[in-house]
Image (cartoon, rainbow, N blue to C red):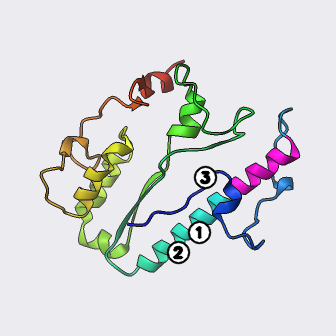
Amino acid sequence: MFHLLGQHLPSRTYYPNNGKYDYFIVDSIQRNEKWITVEKKQYIAEFDNATRYNDMVLGKMFDYFRNTRTVILYLSDHGEEVYDYRDTMGRRIDTEHITKEVIDYQFRVPFMIWISDSYRESFPQIIDLMKKGAARKFMTDNTYNVLFHLGFIKTEFYRSTHDILSEDFVPAKRLLLGKTDCDSIINEK
């Protein structure tokens, strides 16, 4: 298990400060909203650089484990707004008025399973389950069930109904902050 630093704010502190990783610069940010300033473009560029660096670290992990029988599950703990659709940065949530955009930028997170060729060859049935599970609605609270499944760990704590790789999976109501129905907001017209 690895805990990556990710891209929290201030993003500039989440990748090496030696110029080598400054791929995105102010001029790379092609935004023209009236509230976007040069300083805000700099923050966006730094966030993009931190994201690119995080992806590079993941790539090195995949390469390191490529010739072993390995499965890697990657997810983020939360999203981050960096002037994506409004004049704000960070995690600003009006809990009484959660919008689809807030969900998209602050609550929807990457959830990815990478598998080595050796794991794929050893457990082809898992690949079929991954394909079926890819489109299922899921909350990261239940990630432990997926880990138990992928690691063939037998425990009384495993709940097949909460495991997106299980034929027994039952989608649960996805609540944000313990009370807001995520899907009702996403599906609003």
Magenta segment: 37-48
Question: What x and y, as percent, mark residue 94?
Answer: 58, 25
Residue assigned mark 1: 56
Which is more N-terminal, label 1 or label 3?
A: 3
The C terminus: image quadrant: top right
- Disc 2 and disc 1 in contact, CB within 8 angstroms: yes
Report the amino acid beneath label 2.
Lys
Question: What x and y, as percent, mark residue 39?
Answer: 84, 47
**Magenta span contains residue 105:** no
Residue assigned mark 2: 60
Q: Classify mark 3: residues with Cα within 10 Å, few (<14), some (14-19) or many (20+).
A: some
Give the CA distance from mark 3 to mark 2: 21 Å
Question: What x and y, as percent, mark residue 185?
Answer: 49, 23
Question: What x and y, as percent, mark residue 162?
Answer: 25, 42
Element carrying mark 2: helix
The residue under the point 28% across, 57% down is: 147
Residue assigned mark 3: 8
The residue under the point 59% across, 69% down is: 56
In the rendered view, would you say 128 is above or below 81?
A: below
The residue under the point 60% across, 38% down is: 91
Report the amino acid beneath label 3.
His
Seen in the image, is 45 located left or right of residue 13? right
